[in-house]
Image (cartoon, rainbow, N blue to C red):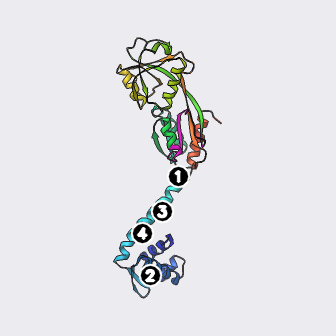
Amino acid sequence: MDFQQLKYFQVLSQIQHVTHAAEHLSLSQPALSRSIARLEEELGVPLFERHNRSIRLNRYGELFLKRVNRVMKDIEDGKRELYEMVHPERGEVSLGFLHTLGTHIIPDLIGEFKNMYPAVRFQLIENHSYSLLNELIGGELDLCLLAEPENVAPNVEWTPLWEEELYATLPLHHRLSSAQSIALNDLKDEPFIMLKKGYALRQTTDHMFEEYGITPIIAFEGEEAATVAGMVGAGLGVSLLPDLKGFDRSSIAQVHLRHPGSHRTIGLAVRMDGYLSPSALNFKQFVLQKFGVR
């Protein structure tokens, strides 16, 4: 059984006349009859009641036609979806990004891009850097905006775009919350609320502590910067976080650190051996140009 046989069966079911169906298919009548006979032989049941060259479906044919119509519709839908995915004006971009970028950077980028390509759709996934990298490598994402990973797979290209300052994030009424800047050592005896091990931001902050010979007191570990900030705001500890634009900062203070490495780099990751649709390629070039990368 093949696609051509199913198409012949579908057309013959609609027209219910062998000669007319053969003409519609630009096929000889004997060739159409042979194709239907092979299909019936494979299925083990007759599909039509024949009256000379005029035919109509029997109950087996009616049941099978429902399935064939569904299959043919799925194939046509799939062809249309593939066309839209690869068409630069109507495709889909699967984009992964860090939670902290979801309130300002991502909406701004997508909004500006859709001014140029209004019919392009986006599939958006928020997660931490290493989970996004795994999804990228697995082919679930076209591109990712994430912090610089320590180890990049050989088939992944990561291009730095911008740096984000990391701040001492303190409860609003902390003794240092009104300072212009502080040293990391000023917080060495404070309980810290950090992201979990394995997150790129956690690796960056761990390196900062190691450089200054500080062993932080870890009170809590979370999975999202907003959760960490909320716990800081509740007075449960301090943290090192990027500027939390778009998040509730009413109960925290973010103070500059006098530390030359108090930043993280955000970049664009793509698979070098993966397929990018024209719309995804357009978005990649748009992002690189937006941040002055050639």
| Front position among marks 3 and 4 | 4
> Marks 3/4: CA distance?
12 Å
Q: Which residue is mark 4?
A: 68
Amino acid type at mark 3: Glu
> Marks 3/1: CA distance?
14 Å
Q: Which residues are magenta?
A: 135-157
Amino acid type at mark 4: Val
Tell whether label 2 touches label 1 (CB within 8 Å). no
Binning the other alpha carbons within 10 Å of mark 1 as few (below 14), some (14 to 19) or many (20 upward) gives many
Q: In the orientation shown, which residue stands out farthest toward the right? A: 294
| Front position among marks 4 and 2 | 4
Compare marks 1 and 4 and give the one earlier in the sequence. 4
Binning the other alpha carbons within 10 Å of mark 2 as few (below 14), some (14 to 19) or many (20 upward) gives some
**Residue 54 percent location from the top left of the image:** 42, 84
Q: Secondary structure at mark 3?
A: helix
Residue at x 53% of width, y 15% of height: 258
Compare marks 4 and 2 and give the one earlier in the sequence. 2
Q: Which residue is mark 1?
A: 85
Tell whether label 4 touches label 3 (CB within 8 Å). no
Binning the other alpha carbons within 10 Å of mark 4 as few (below 14), some (14 to 19) or many (20 upward) gives some
Residue at x 50% of width, y 31% of height: 200
Amino acid type at mark 2: His
Q: Which residue is mark 2?
A: 17
Q: Secondary structure at mark 2?
A: loop
Compare marks 1 and 2 and give the one earlier in the sequence. 2
Q: Secondary structure at mark 4?
A: helix
| Front position among marks 2 and 3 | 3
Q: Which residue is mark 3?
A: 76
